[in-house]
Amino acid sequence: MASMRSILFVILILPLVSCDRSAKVEGATTPASAIIETREGPSAAELAEVTKIVMLGTGTPVPDANRAGASVAVIHKGQAYLFDIGAGAIHNATRARYKHAIPSLYPSQICCLFVTHMHSDHTLDYAELVYTLWWRRTAQLRAFGPPGMQEMTDGLHAMMAPDLRARIASSQPVANPDGYQVEVTEIADGFVFDQDGVRIEAFAVDHGDIKPAFGYRIDTSDRSIVISGDTAKSERLLEMSRGVDVLIHEVISDSGLAKNSEGFQAYHRQSHTPASDLGRLASEARPGLLVLYHGLYYGVPEARIVEEVKSTYDGPVVLANDLDQF
Ligand SMILES: [Zn+2]
Ligand SMILES: [Zn+2]
């Protein structure tokens, strides 16, 4: 009987397995992952797409089983512009590439990174972005951020020098020996990136002692977006956000904040935006949609933070999860 079962297994199951493999090789509409991807540039289909937002990380420094560190991708005409790169963001980029069929989110295809500030929960996956499949990267990564960006990049290269030496000196074919290099631009308040139909402006926000800390406003032909980064309630952000299509804003629960020690309450009040204050800001800014991310809960159920925002705001609001698309 056992050998009959084995024969049946071979007859019935193996053809299914090999079918699946050939689908991978030939590339279905939504390909399976674990594929080396290269491309000359965006396809006609990508160029025709509307601007999309993909949440690559909605978390904070607090380890969270369901949320990567802060990171938001804006996809425009086949290019992915990342805003922050917290821990886990690049694995989520790979997941989003296949879940949502967005080729520009394949890690070695990501074109540009904009960092809001130098806190680790916004930068820890920089190594992952720069060094994943670096030897096959065709277009040099561009990274924009506050002073410290170059120092962090130099330190990253020092950390990874053994990898560079090993691969370049070994028999491994290295398509692009310079693929790990990053074009770094350290920016100041008011910096504007204007290229390929995307205008991105950095503006200073109020993140306590961390100076500078930037928010970003992104404008394309079909969409306007503001990303807060980390900030207390900011007048500057309010001015940049009036009537914007999508406002993506950090938040701390009012009731969660009250559970903190006096010292931490004072720190959070000058560094982050309590939910009820965010509701007040959104009531003035009137975005098309308010998206909450980087939520600090301190044990309060996640849904409560939305209720706290709604206590002072009657517009559309959603609490983002990783891989959400807007
Ligand atoms: Zn921060
Ligand atoms: Zn943060």
Image: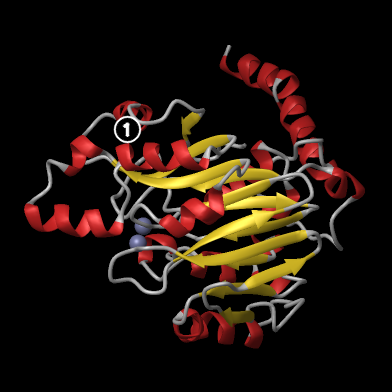
Q: Is residue 260 above or below residue 208?
A: above
The x, y position of residue 160, in whole percent, is 49, 80
Question: The C terminus is located in which quarter?
Answer: top right
Q: Quadrant of ligand 1?
A: bottom left
Is 17 placed left or right of 68 in the picture? right
Label 1 crowd (10 A; few <14 / some 14-19 / many >=20): many
User: Is residue 173 toward the left or the right of residue 310 in the image?
Assistant: right
| Three-letter code for the amino acid on which mark 1 is drawn | Ile
Residue 306's spot in the image, x, y percent?
Answer: 37, 29
Task: Relative to 114, say whether 58 is above or below.
Answer: above
Q: Residue furthest left?
A: 262
Q: Could you say whether the residue bearing mark 1 is in a helix, strand or loop?
A: helix
What residue is rendered at 70% in x and 40% in y?
32
Kindly identify the residue that appears in the image at 61 percent across and 65 percent down. 201
Does residue 151 appear to the left or right of 251 in the view shown?
right
Residue 153 seen in the figure: yes
Q: Residue at x 52, y 54 (%)?
A: 239
* Residue 87, visible in the rendered structure: no
Residue appearing at x 77%, y 76% in the figure = 175
Q: Quadrant of the N terminus?
A: top right
Residue bearing the label numbered 1? 305
Which one is in front, 47 or 140? 47
Q: Is mark 1 within 8 Å of ligand 2?
A: no
Q: How many marks?
A: 1
Work out whether residue 230 or residue 72 is closer to the camera in this orientation and state it. 230
